[in-house]
Amino acid sequence: MAAREAYISGVGQSQVGMKLTRHPLLLTLDAVREALAEAGLSIGQIDGVSTYPGRMAAYLGFSPVGADELIDALGIRARWYAGGPEITSQLGAVVAAATAVRAGLARHVICFRTVYEAAAMARPEEYPPLRRERVDGNSQWVAPFNATSAANWTAQYAMRHVKRYGLTREQLAQIAINDHANAVLNPRAIVKEPLTLDAYLSARMISSPLCLYDCDRYSDASTVLIVSAGEALDEVKCTPIRIAAMAGVVERHSWDQAEWMACYPTGQELWKHTDYKPSDVDTVQLYDGFSFQAITWLEALGFCGVGEGGKFIEGGKRIARDGELPLNTFGGQLGAGRLHGFGFAHEAVTQLRGKGGARQIPGDPRVAVATSGGGPLATALLLARD
């Protein structure tokens, strides 16, 4: 194992739910403890922290815990830490940590993402909703057109696939149906029942062609990954998973936006940093804040051609847990809950270690892709069990 490589050692996750009453910092500590126990590390061995997007005082449901708070709560002696929204999406925090350990700035870095959106909506007196007197920042480019939800602009990209490439709702449904089927096997998932095609097609529309089941749901949870330096693996007790390649792209946020989502250049960039090819990948855990985003990632990563994503997943067998390319085996965000990106890397590591339990894919998976982001932000990780 190369000293200057970066590995994911421990992974952990708190309870996942909706309208939880456990404080978000305590959920974060729960996930940290689980990750430390799996890695066989103590808090005294942690010397770095990385998160996205940092604590957002004006929008605490979205991000209630920052790097500073975790460092204080656990007494971490951090030689390096980072946390902010202006990176290539959620898993960009893992990219930053991997870069830090490769540079020798830290040995073991806790990466975390904590969300509390369902609880915050249920208790607005504790977590007051964001109120603004003026529209600025990224919102200035979409709010004047009533595109206040990411569902609106994601639907525009999806409708292009409908009009130009013939994407059907029956094809699109396979992402949600697959997510629900896998979520039933995941004890931490929010969804407990499978989804039928009839139920999907009869659901109310949100923003055409996206219906209710194409959209993830607000959740409360914390997910943790520990990124360790290759030279520090003698301290780790579990099977390390190497970050074989990583890539991220930020496209323009303004209304004069890029023609394609950022996942497309990110997918191309990923394969430039590795000898692995798409045909070597055993499972993919692809961001699906909206079902269409998973289809774009399949195209972007080269598993099928641009515009061929609908046909690639038609019928659902290819992406099923026992198919040729198992997708979102924990239920994705549509089934397991809106873990906001980190759940995909957590599941990739879980599958590569053979710890998926009832949802474990057949065979001996050794290579996985995990992604986050849609629209102007995107990050991809290629993970390998050497």
Image (spheres, rainbow, N blue to C red):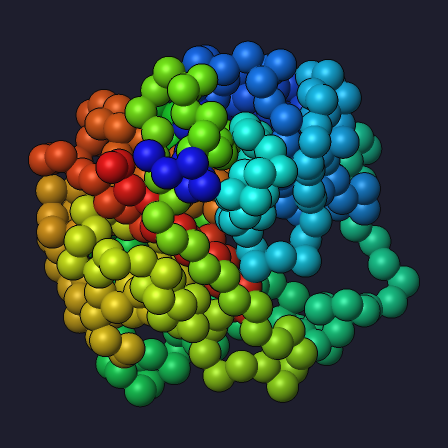
Decide if residue 374 is on the left or right side of residue 319. right
Image quarter of the N terminus: top left
Horizontal side of residue 271 vs 81, given as left or right = left
Quick one: 372 or 1, which is closer to the camera? 1
For image coordinates 35% across by 66% down, the residue present is: 272
Nearer to the camera, 106 or 198: 106
Q: Is residue 129 above or below residue 270?
A: above
Q: Residue at x 69, y 44 (%)?
A: 83
Q: Residue 43 is drawn in which quadrant?
A: top right
Q: As drawn, which residue projects farthest toward the right?
A: 133
Vertically, is 361 above or below 285? above
- Residue 136 appears anywhere in the view: yes
Residue at 85% across, 59% down: 132
Comparing 216 with 264, the one in front is 264
Task: Residue 344: give x, y in percent of width and height.
Answer: 40, 43
- Residue at 62%, 14% (x, y): give it: 44
Q: Position of residue 211 (x, y in %)?
A: 40, 61
Rendering coords of residue 11 (x, y %):
44, 27
Numbered circles on residues, count: 0
**In which quadrant of the rendered image does the C terminus lie?**
top left
Question: Percent position (x, y) of residue 197?
Answer: 22, 54
Name which quarter of the figure residue 37 lies in.
Answer: top left
Question: Would residue 223 be seen by someone viewing this image from the given angle?
Answer: no
Give the left or right position of residue 239, taking residue 222 as reference.
Answer: left
